[in-house]
Amino acid sequence: MLARKNKLIFLKLLSLFSVVRGYNILIIVLAQYLTSIFILAPHIRLRGVIFDPNLFVIVLASAGVIAAGYIINSFYDSEKDLINRPQKTMLDRLVSQQTKLTGYFVLNFLSVVLASYVSFRAVLFFSLYIFGIWFYSHKLKKYPIIGNTVASTLAITPFFAVFIYYKNFDEVIFVHATFLFLILIMREMVKDLENLKGDMAQDYKTIPVVYGELSSKRIITTLIIASGIPVYLLLTRYEIGFMYYYFYGCLALLLISLIVVWGSKKKTHYLWLHNILKLIIVSGTFSIILIDLNVVLDRILW
C-alpha cells in the first residue's frame, strides 16, 4: 500500500515536471547566467555575476513566470494535446486542472513579489510578461503569423530582463538576439506542422491550417535563408572567439533543415526538424563559453 502511494507521488511529481517543462527552464536559467557572464557583463568578475542578488532574483522570477506560462498553456491546450501528444497528455493529467491553476497563480504571485526586491520597473516588466503569456495562450496562439511571432517574442523575453538590468546596448547583442529570434519563430512554424491534426480538430487558425503546408514550408525556407544574415555578420564583423565553430555548425544544420523541410511528409519528419532546431538552441547555450576561453580560465580562478 505504501509502495503504491509512493509510486503515485513520484508519478505526480513527474507529471508536474512535465507540465512546467522543467528541463526547458533549467536551460533558460543556464542561458541567462552564461549570457550575463560572457556577453552582457564581460567586465564584471565571475563572483560578481554569480553572487549578484538582483540577477539571481531576476532569473528566479523569470523561471517562475515561464513555469506558470507552461501551466496555463497546458490548461488551454489540453484537448489539442490529447490528439497530438496523447502519452504526454495522459501523464500531465495526473495533476488536476484545479491544482495546475493554483500553481499558476502562486508562481506568478511569487515571481512579482521577487521582482519587487529589484525595483518597481522589474515588477512592471514581469507583470506585463505574465499578461502577455496569458493573452497569447488564451487568444493569440490560435491566429496565424501573429501567434508564431508573439510566441517567439515571449520565448526571448527572459533575456531582455537581464539585458535591461545590465544596460548593455552593444550592437553584437542585437545580432545574437536576431539569430535566436529567427530560430525560435522557425521552431514555432515547425510545431504548427507537427501539430496539424490537433489544430484542425480544435479550430486553431495556424498557417498550415489556413494557408496549407506548402505555404508553411515556403515561410520556413525564407526564415532559414534570413537566419544566414546574422550568422554572416557574427562570423565576419564581430569578435566571437571560438564560437565561430558553433555558427559554422549552425549553417550545416540549417542546410540539413532545408532539405528535411522539403522532404517532410508526415509528423515524424517534422519532429526530426523540430529536434534539429532544438539542438541549435540548446547547443547555442553551452557554446557561449567559447566566446572567450581565456575568460573562462581566468574566472575559474576567480
Image (spheres, grey):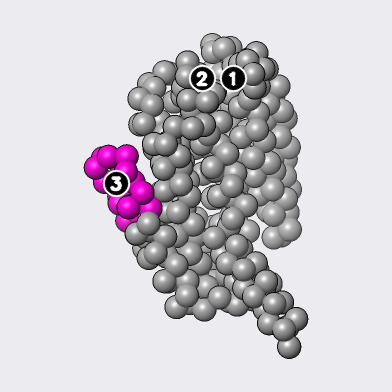
Give, as a three-letter code, the residue at label 2.
Arg
Residue wearing tag 1? 302
How far is the residue under mark 3 from the one under mark 1? 30 Å
Are dots 1 and 2 in contact, CB under 8 Å? Answer: yes
The image shows residue 265 at horizontal and vertical percentages of 71, 56
Residue wearing tag 2? 45
> In which quadrant is the N terminus drawn?
bottom right
Q: Main secondary structure of the magenta part?
A: helix
Marked residue nearer the N-terminal end (3 or 1) = 3
Q: Write the residue at 71% across / 34% down.
A: 253
Q: Circle 2: is it few (<14), some (14-19), or many (20+) Cα within 10 Å? A: some
What residue span does the magenta drawing correspond to? 111-132
| Residue 61 visible to the viewer | yes
How far is the residue under mark 1 from the one under mark 2? 7 Å
The image shows residue 25 at horizontal and vertical percentages of 55, 50
| Residue 37 among those drawn in magenta | no
Marked residue nearer the N-terminal end (1 or 2) = 2
Q: At numbered mark 2, what does the secondary structure look like: helix, strand or loop?
A: loop
The image shows residue 98 at horizontal and vertical percentages of 45, 78
The answer to which of 251 and 11 lies nearer the viewer is: 11
The answer to which of 99 and 232 lies nearer the viewer is: 99
The answer to which of 97 and 122 lies nearer the viewer is: 122
Give, as a three-letter code, the residue at label 1.
Trp
Residue wearing tag 3? 116
Q: Is residue 63 left or right of residue 161?
A: right
